[in-house]
Structures are given as C-alpha cells and as structure tokens.
C-alpha cells in the first residue's frame, strides 16, 4: 500500500520514458520508505536488484552480489568475482543477456554498505556507468542509501568519475500530518486528529513506524505495545537506528542527547561544552551529517550573523525515546496509558507540539495566506541580563512583504485562553523584539494552537491564528 508518494512515483516512472540511460539517486532518513517506494513503483521492470549487507567486509559483499546476479539469471559458469570491477563486469554480462527492449532497471540498495574500506567499490561503479551504462540508451540505474551524508559526498557531489553523472535525485521526506491521516484511513484505523497529532509527536512522519499501529487499539494502547512492553518492537530501535547510519554512533548520540536536554536548542559552543568533544573538522562534519540525515536542524538567530546558528533536535522518535523509554525507571508496560492527561504528558505535549509545527511550516504559511511569499524562518533569543528579561521565540517568519510573524505554538485540549498577564507579556515581548532588532517591518503575533484561541477580551493582541486542522492540509 503506497500512500502519499505520487510525485516521487511520477519521477521514477518518468525515467522509463527517457531516450537516454538514467542515473537516479534516492536518499532520506532511515525507515522513511525509500526501498518500498522503488519496489512498489519499478519492480516489474527490474533487471537486477541487490542490497548491501551491514557491517561485513568486501568478500562477503562480493559473495552476496554474485548470489543476486545468479538469482536474476546470470549463468552459473561465470565464476564469483574477486573484486568490484569483475562484479560490475558480470552485471554487464547479465544486462547484455536480457532480451527485453524496455528500459532495464538496475537497483542497488544501501549503497554505502557496499563501499567497504579499500574495496574500490566507487571506482568500479564509476567505470560501470561511464564505460557501459551511459553508452547505452536502455539503462535506469537507481541507487538508494540511508546515509544521506555518504550520498551527498560520494555520489551527488562527486568530484571524480561520477561528477555531474546523476540525472535525477529524490530526497524522500517523512509524511506530513495529512498523509499520515490518509495512511490510517487506508489501514482502517480510526483516530481523531488530536490522536494523529500525538502519534506524529511521538513517531514523526516515518511510515515504517506508522505501519506498526493496530486498528481496534487506542493510541495509548498502541504506544504501550510499541515502546513499553517487554517485547516492544521499538525498545532497541534507537541504538539500531544510529548504528545503521554512522560508523561511530557513540559521538553522534552524544550530540543528540545534549540537544535533547535543551528545548530551545544549542549553539555549536554549547554542544561542545556539553559533549566534551573536540572542536575540529570531525565535529563540524558530525553536525552536517546529523542535519543531512534529518535528525537535527540549524536555525539562524534573527538579527545576528549567519554563522551564529542554533541547533535543535527535531526527530520526534528520538526525542520521545530519550525522554520516556531510556529514562523509564518504572518498567511499567502500560506506562503511556497510565500517564495520559498527567503532568508528565502535558509537559511533553507542549514541547512536542512545537516540533510538530516546525515540521509543518509550509502548512502554516498556507494558512496565513503567504505560501507564495518569500520567507526566512529563524529563532530569536535574548539572554536575561540585569533588569532586561530574557526572550525566546521558537519560530520567527520574516516575510518579503514587510511583515514578521512571531509564532506562539500552544497545545491544549480545548481553546487556548490568553490571560491578562500573558497578554501583557506578549505585548512586552513584541516591543522588546522590535527594539532589539531595530526592524522597520510590522510585527504580528501569530498563534498556532490545537483548537484555536478563545475570543475573549485579550484575543485582539494576536494578528493571526493557525489551528491543528490547518496543519493537515
């Protein structure tokens, strides 16, 4: 059941119509459905499919590649290859043997696992494409990988024999709330939009995780089964997830845990202090890789220099795991059910809703009627000093049409009520922002809430509001 990937399917099927051979790269966060998308769309056209094996050496990789060649019809009198050049030569033999006049789809999955140390895999892939595949008109080479940084460095931004050879690239993103709702309907699972939002706040838009939900169970029952039972399928997912992407996951996890401890995010210097990692190019590379893989995101600080970034942990699954699974000392298998509507739940939901909103900025812009307006999203922070109050604004939308939206993201079980004191603080904070940034633009207070803002005496302070239903569009 393929849901919400119409555009990506159209791109993949369009490769079959091209008059020249095509080299397509599909990448994205692990568990986001890359392999499933390709198989569901192009499997009838496969001439060859192979997936790399995690954490094994060159000889095992070559053996498994050879077995895949045999599965797809290579004659057994061809001997097992001793290196990758011989392996790709056998792939050429298999392709030449294929009688079909249609495009021949070659799908190589988990490409980074094939590229073991001193294996010359990339050089052999380059030679295969440049000397064989690109000289024909009937090859569609599709490569797929969960290590986004490896793909960017070695394939898309390759400066050697694969320079500028990629003809199409697809970055597969997690589902939006609207697509998650569509997925549940197709699975005959009945959840309210509030439940769908909370499921998203726990699992993000990762299709693999959503596939474990069962109809007939409440959301809390599902979460207990998935995270807190003795045999819960996601109990060891955190370690497996990072180990499958990064060669030395412990340092990446250290950064992740540091960011997970601070809701407002951290600067580079704060991360270094918290993790005690060395301030070098390796550390810089780790930040880039975590962001490319979709676990963290860097934001400009409004009104400051471009290099003064704030890093946030935005992967919902990771944040939920760190807060509730790793730190769960009770070992209660119905932990989530027992804590529904508890202070623990309310405190978590407020922060998790902010992350949900950050994943749906295009929907927020559409609700504000500015989907066609050029914008820049950032954060604003001012540390309290003396009599000056500290200010933290988690989403600032700076618009080219002369307006800045200061977004307040509030989660509640009913209409959000602005009190007199809170109204005074909102007005004061807006004035602090205008004074400190010296902006000449109009500054609008925008509320993003689950069920809207109650229209009481203090409602007029806000200029615009976005509701949870808007985020499903």
Image (cartoon, grey):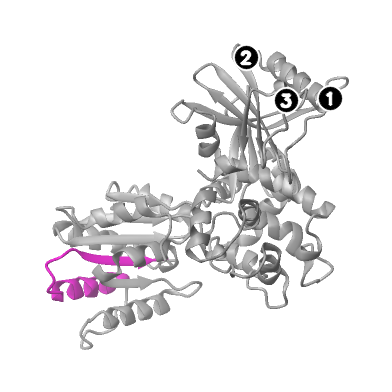
Quick one: 53 or 188, which is closer to the camera? Answer: 188
Crowd around label 1: few <14 · some 14–19 · many ≥20 (10 Å):
few
Quick one: 454 or 333, which is closer to the camera? Answer: 454
Instruction: Using the image, tell me which numbered label, if any, was put on residue 439.
Output: 2
Label 2: which secondary element: loop
Q: Which residue is mark 3?
A: 459
> What is the magenta range?
84-110
Relative horizontal placement of residue 64, taking residue 464 as reference (left or right):
left
Mark 3–mark 2 Cα distance, whole angstroms, equals: 24 Å
- 3 or 2: tag closer to the N-terminus: 2
Q: Quadrant of residue 382?
A: top right
Residue mark closest to the camera, 3 vs 2 = 3
Place of residue 244 in the rendered image (x, y in percent of width and height, measured from the top left) = 54, 65
Place of residue 284 in the rendered image (x, y in percent of width and height, measured from the top left) = 58, 44
Q: Quadrant of residue 91?
A: bottom left
Q: Give the vertical position of 253 relative to 298 (above or below).
A: below
Relative horizontal placement of residue 6, taking residue 389 as reference (left or right):
left
Q: Is residue 279 visible?
A: no
Residue mark closest to the camera, 2 vs 1 = 1
Mark 1–mark 3 Cα distance, whole angstroms, equals: 10 Å
Q: Residue furthest bottom?
A: 77
Place of residue 339 in the rendered image (x, y in percent of width and height, measured from the top left) = 80, 60
Quick one: 19 or 198, which is closer to the camera? Answer: 198
Crowd around label 3: few <14 · some 14–19 · many ≥20 (10 Å):
some
Q: Which residue is mark 1?
A: 420
Q: Give the vertical position of 120 relative to 20 (above or below).
A: below
- 2 or 1: tag closer to the N-terminus: 1
Label 3: which secondary element: helix
């Amino acid at each position: 059941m393929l849901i919400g990937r119409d555009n990506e399917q159209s791109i993949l099927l369009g490769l079959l119509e091209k008059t020249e051979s095509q080299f397509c790269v599909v990448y994205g966060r692990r568990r986001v459905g890359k392999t499933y998308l390709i198989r569901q769309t192009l499997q009838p056209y496969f001439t060859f499919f192979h997936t790399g094996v995690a954490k094994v050496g060159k000889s095992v990789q070559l053996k498994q590649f050879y077995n895949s060649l045999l599965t797809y019809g290579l004659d057994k009198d061809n001997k097992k290859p001793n290196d990758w050049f011989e392996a790709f030569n056998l792939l050429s033999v298999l392709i030449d043997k294929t009688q079909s006049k249609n495009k021949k789809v070659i799908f190589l999955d988990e490409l980074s696992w094939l590229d073991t140390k001193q294996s010359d895999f990339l050089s052999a892939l380059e030679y295969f494409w440049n000397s064989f595949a690109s000289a024909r008109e009937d090859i569609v080479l599709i490569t797929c990988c969960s290590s986004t940084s490896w793909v960017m460095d070695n394939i898309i931004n390759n400066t050697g024999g694969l320079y500028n050879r990629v003809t199409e690239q697809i970055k597969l993103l997690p589902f939006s709330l609207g697509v998650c709702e569509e997925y549940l309907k197709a699975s005959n699972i009945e959840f309210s939009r509030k439940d769908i939002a909370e499921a998203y706040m726990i699992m993000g838009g990762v299709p693999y995780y959503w596939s474990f939900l069962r109809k007939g169970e409440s959301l809390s029952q599902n979460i207990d089964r998935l995270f807190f039972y003795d045999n819960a399928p996601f109990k060891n997912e955190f370690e497996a997830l990072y180990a499958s992407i990064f060669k030395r996951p412990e340092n990446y996890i250290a950064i992740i845990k540091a960011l997970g401890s601070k809701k407002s995010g951290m600067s580079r210097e704060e991360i270094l202090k918290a993790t005690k990692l060395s301030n070098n190019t390796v550390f810089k590379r780790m930040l880039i890789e975590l962001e490319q893989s979709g676990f963290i995101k860097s934001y400009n600080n409004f009104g400051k220099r471009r290099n003064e970034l704030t890093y946030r942990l935005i992967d919902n699954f990771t944040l939920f795991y760190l807060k509730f699974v790793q730190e769960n000392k009770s070992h209660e298998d119905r932990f989530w059910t027992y804590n529904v509507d508890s202070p623990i739940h309310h405190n978590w939901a407020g922060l998790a809703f902010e992350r949900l909103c950050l994943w749906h900025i295009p929907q927020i812009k559409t609700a504000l009627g500015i989907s066609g307006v050029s914008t820049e999203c950032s954060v604003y922070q001012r540390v309290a000093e003396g009599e000056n109050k500290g200010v933290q604004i988690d989403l600032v939308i700076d618009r080219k049409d002369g307006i800045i939206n200061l977004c307040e993201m509030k989660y509640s079980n009913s209409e959000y009520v602005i009190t007199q004191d809170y109204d005074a603080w909102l007005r004061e904070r807006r004035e602090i922002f205008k004074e400190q940034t010296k902006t000449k633009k109009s500054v609008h207070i925008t509320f993003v809430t689950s069920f809207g803002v109650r229209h009481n005496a203090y409602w007029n302070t806000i200029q615009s509001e976005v509701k949870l239903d808007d985020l499903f569009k």
